Image (tube, grey):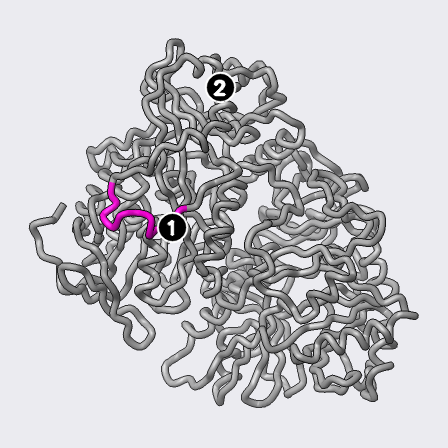
Amino acid sequence: MDKSMSLPEAASVVVIGGGVMGCSVLYHLAKMGVKDVVLLERKQLTCGTTWHSAAQVRQLRSSNNMTELIKYSTELYAGLEAETGQSTGWIKTGSLVLATNEDRFTFIKRQASLAKLFNVETHIIDQSEAAEMWPMMNADDVVGAIYSPDDGRVNPSDLCVALIKGAKANGARVFEDSEVTGFDIENGRVAAVRTEHGDIKCEKVVNCAGLWGRRIGEMAGVTVPLYACEHFYLLTKAIKGMGAHLPTLADHDNYLYMRDEVGGLLAGCFEPNAKGIALDKLPHDFAFDLLNEDWDHFEPMMINALHRIPALETAEVRMLLNGPESFTPDGNFLIGEAPEVGGFFVGCGMNSVGIAAGGGMGKALAQWVVADEAPMDLWSVDIRRFARFSANERMLSKRVPEMMGLHYVVGYPGRELESARGVRRSALHDRLAQSGAQFGLRMGWERADWFAEDGDPVPPPLKYGEPGWHDAVGRECFAARNGVALFDQSSFAKLLLQGPDAEAVLQRLCANNVAVEPGQVVYTAMLNDRGGMESDFTAFRLAGDRYMLITGSSQPVRDKNWIEKNLLDGEFVTLTDITSSLAVLSIMGPKSRTLLQRLTDTDMGNDTFPMFTSREISLGYATVRAARLSYVGELGWELYVPVEMAAGLYDELMAAGEDLGLRNAGMLALGSLRVEKGYRSWGHDITPDETPLEAGLGFAVKLKTDIAFKGRQAIEEQKQEGLNQRLVHFKVVDPSLHLLGHEPILQHDKVIGQVTSAAYSHTLGACAAMGYIQLNGKNPGQIIGEGNFKIEYAAKTYPAEAALEPLFDPKGEHIRC
């Protein structure tokens, strides 16, 4: 394809990789009118992993945006033939997901509840109905299933041909046998792509190189945390009685997916003992190739398949296909502009669902390339959720096979990964471990989730309903509400912004007014042009030309990148990630002042140390920056202490607080306390798709000033036109129900919104939640006044009480005592 043509000297965008993602990005860029778009493929189109994909398209995902993008894939694949004359092989077969135990049934019923939110037709069916849809299936152990009629499958090679035809019809060019060998980077931006046949000057690059995506990234100094695993599926010859175009069969309790294939059976797996493979084990010219069959490895899956489809026992095997595919450390895609190099975009790590996601993800990434801003909330797949250490090959070789092995497991609350642990530890890690800390992972950090005592189940059983850590978290919440608790929040990300233009930069990028005196602390969001919240943080003004920004553990790469790419020419600031230099000990509870006063001569009283102030104080033997803040809704301080002093200060605090009942507390207690208090969490309750007005955070927007800031016009227009949705607080009436988040919210038995955060409130004695409801032209107070709210959990509804104000201490009296 264009083999006889020489490469152009320049292009506006160069797409690297001719698999489904590269073809889709090229197609959508061309359809959007982007001129001089080029695709480079090292060998031939689809020669990597796309050609051997099982090519199933299941629409329902865990979020609305992900689901909408895959729904778009189905519409695109069904309509490409009419546009291009090339069939994609799209067949709407539907999908059938089985449950063989009650926990799996709860899991898929939760999916069915989500389907109502996302307008995906889904039906909960019983054993007999499932058996009727798949007559050759042994359904004896099936307890239930869900059926989605609009799912389907496609022919991957034909799909890519259709996308390329559509792209070329709109001016795009494709060059096969054109291997990329490097990049020219100028002033922090990509300037050219080097190939074996010459260089192409360009403004932007999109790395869709699949298996080779990490290698391509390394050439530009870009972190692309990918690793390959062997992926198996069995193909048989025709089986008598096998129907045609049956629903794709998902038997996840047995780690299997199945479908009919030319009269026979295709049976693939995501086995728990997945096999990783380093790229240096593959030939350099690997194309349309497969790995060796491994029947010993596949045998347990074969036994499972024989149980589900007894006719397989006498079927004639065509082949056991073993193809390498690329996976990420958390099982989500890698999409977006790389933080290290401007104009270098990534669309890799499709985790074996590239065909399903390719159409929608290709469109979203193309929009991102054109607008230099994500078109919607794509944080779950944003490449900026990873840091440089995330591409450590030794860590990837352990973590990625584990993630592949978890592809089909039940999504129990509290499941933690086991591989590559202990990568990032706070200075207090060992002390917390000795105190019974049970650790969870966030951005590589080991964080204490809860603290076990004698009688607590360790490890706790994974299950739905009341978790094994319920009583332990209750103890910690009680201490924070009635006494004093210590939270190790050292994983908080800390960015130091300094320079003569520091205030001007933040005033332009932040929704709240940060032009405060040194020693003041401001809560603020950064908005996109749609008014959505790209991040939120607390800004500590340390001096006239210096701020410390405290943001979420998973957000430092994203936030740093957002600020840097929005700097104007001539603005002089430096931005440094100082997370590792400071530990954070949060002392929270009504007795926190008493505790701290025992170790300092500084007056910690309200008049001398009011809310939203910070200052350096001597505390014990340490010098710390104490900030009068609280994420739990009680009197408290966050103590920012040099890492080398953290352990000593911790020991002094624990000794001084013994008679006050000072207790270690973890992230689960913090989550429970902040939900009942109504404190928002970025990535859950606030995202790039929600505005501060919708989130009830209008108090943190400087509309009363004449200061221009990014997103101001959108907020002003929304304020004038009115809101379409509003964040609301809920308490479930049934005290036995434990919500997990993302559940549908109903009023008068109609779906009107979705839960964004939920946690059992030990203060209220029932589950508390936050979520957005659609207003449909009504006032939020009017809707709440109508009552009759319910929350749906696993296809069953439960009454709930709603309020605009927080459920606990709505006037904020506790925090100011």
Q: Which residue is mark 2?
A: 306
Q: Residue furthest left?
A: 4
Crowding near pointer 1: few (<14 within 10 Å), some, many (20+)? few
* Residue at (74, 70) in percent of width and height: 586
Instruction: Answer whether residue 282 is magenta in the image.
Output: yes
Q: Residue furthest front?
A: 296
Q: Quadrant of the N terminus?
A: top left
* Residue at (74, 58) in percent of width and height: 437
- Position of 21 with respect to 256 (left or right) is left
Residue 55: give x, y in percent of width and height.
36, 34
Image quadrant assignment for residue 91: top left
Residue 386: give x, y in percent of width and height.
48, 61
Image quadrant assignment for residue 658: bottom right
- Position of 3 with respect to 163 (left or right) is left
Q: Which residues fall within the magenta stretch?
A: 277-287
Q: Is residue 459 above or below residue 390?
A: above
Which amino acid type is shown beneath numbered disc 2? Leu
